[in-house]
Image (tube, grey):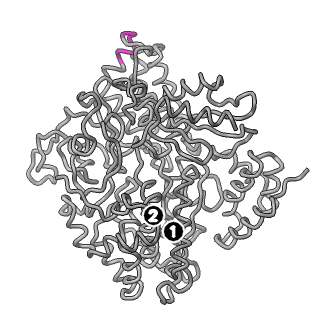
Amino acid sequence: MLKRTDYLTKVYGVPNGWTLAAYEQHSTGYRVAKKVLTSMTQEQCVAEAKKANIRGRGGAGFPMGVKWSFMRPHPTKPAYLVVNADEGEPGTHKDRTLMELNPHACIEGCIIGCFGIGAHTAYIYVRDELHLSKARLNAAIAEAKAKGYLGKNPFGTNYAVDVVVHSGAGAYICGEETSMLNSLEGKRGEPRMKPPFPAQAGAFGCPTTVNNLETIAACPTAFDIGCEEFSKLSALHHMNDGGVRLYGVNGHVKKPGVVELACGPTLNELIYDIGGGVLGDRGVMCVITGGSSTPVLRPSETVNAPDEKSPMHAWHGKSVFDVPLGVDTMRGCGTMLGTCCVTVMAEGTDPVMAFENLMYFYHHESCGQCTPCREGSAWLDRTVSKIFHGDGAIADVDQLHDIDNGIMGNTICAFGEGTAMPALAFIHKFRKELEAYARGEKKRKDARLTVDDVWNKGASR
Amino acid sequence: MPFALTPERETAFQELQSRYPTKMALCLPLLHLCQEQNGWISEDVMLFVSQRLELSPAHVKGVVTFYTLYNQKPVGKHQVWVCRTLPCALRGAYDVIEHCEKKLGIKCGETTKDGQITLRTAECLASCGTAPMIQVDKEYFENLTPEKLDEILAKLAKG
């Protein structure tokens, strides 16, 4: 069910909505951080946060409050909050809007987050390319400091909070939490073995919580209206998937963009009600539900959950495009919710070309630490490219399965699965097209990723 | 001549120091400052960073070679990055690349003869809802059309 909200996005449309004045007038204006710091204990803060059922907005969907509760005070070491704003998952464009248009929600969220986990410093790790985002965050920090909301005595309390914006340097892998910690420490951004988990030994060897930027930015709203009430806004509250979040639509839709909705819209609602329908009123070939690491879904797929006890039974027999988007519901559909930014591909798009485009990405971005991922992603890229360019055979299509198998489960971080799972989905769901290329029935020169000449016709305004 | 920061950047570096508990953590921010000044990360710059932060030159080189945004050779005065990843490609990124290559007379990865523009491809720049797009130095240009792109390139070629 589509339910538009504007807790986070109200200031998006306000002139200079990124300033403190606008944030005070139209949003929570640091009232919530003040309330939390002056009237709650850390335990109460975490207990309340758990009720919000905020599932991590970065893609993995881990409950935020539960993650906070893993933090234990260390006798000698400080704790850190690290906020993941390394937005770079292909198809994801939500966090950037928050930083550019509502940076104060991010900073207020950092204050609440720091208090909840017992940290006094928050590092917001922003990818280097987002210069405007960094500038807006830094300006927001300066404004908040000047007002006494940040620093040694925020709101007159003794709970010091400092927020630092840290710039990445161009590496997709640094969106992986342990890789991000290495990068923050001034090292190559290679993921770490877990355990120890960041809550035990994270940034600089100290207890650390890593939260996505949108997760943190949702805190002021949740604590303002009451975390349980916040959770109940969601259509999937009963599945512990609460609140409101940002949804993105991109690719072959008429009106791409980012909107704020209560959790639980369906893919069809995002494509047609939010995205304005498909370019040229075509049908949908497939969608990527939340960033390129989530397996594609095709409209012909249906939910298979015949037993009434299954949480997915409510949608048994229905198209996966009519299932509310949630962390657990998308798992039930054989994909992942990911970052909630949907990439739509219209009928007429060449799926093999799309597959090739994505495999180039993973080959380019593998950090090279683990052999199965370093060699596997390159091998996948080479093989798909070979098939696409007309030099492949059916045996190559089958070999893609083998390569995939060699990557999955054999790497330190989830990048391996993030490459292999969407690849597997492309191989399964577009086997016919891959074979057509392998047999020479389809040719690279006829393939297009755009539809309706979108570039020349200026459909992108 | 050994590399050194300008006085303004030196001040900026001093301010950064208080934000991190270790010297090593300054590695990425200091490299950014150096590149801003020098345009690329030369051996001299790496040596400078390693000495200032008491790190081995090998550590610094390891960092420089890991991240794509540290230029390991000189680049043009302006850098044009075309996002080529799927969501942009669905809305014409390949056409944008072709258009740029034709207009500038260079291939991706090359610099124009007058040293003005380096053209490169980028992986997803988090601008999928406003595709296709390019980044020029520190600025994003989104919802591109052939006309808009021509305008941007013409302006860049001038100065």
Residue A115 point in image, percent of width and height: 44, 79
Residue A434 point in image, percent of width and height: 36, 20
Which subunit holds the residue at mark 1? A
Whether residues under marks 2 and 1 lie with C-beta atoms below 8 angstroms apart, the answer is yes
Question: Disc number at residue A18?
Answer: 2
Name of the residue lying farthest toward the left: A308
Magenta span contains residue A113: no
* Residue at image location 20% in from the left, 63% down from the top: A237
Q: Secondary structure at mark 2?
A: loop
Question: Disc number at residue A262?
Answer: none
Residue A455 point in image, percent of width and height: 42, 28
Residue type marked 2: Trp
* Residue at image location 57% in from the left, 44% down from the top: A367
- Res A248 seen here: yes
Which residue is labeled 1 in the image? A140
**Tally of numbered tags:** 2
* Residue at image location 71% in from the left, 54% down from the top: B31
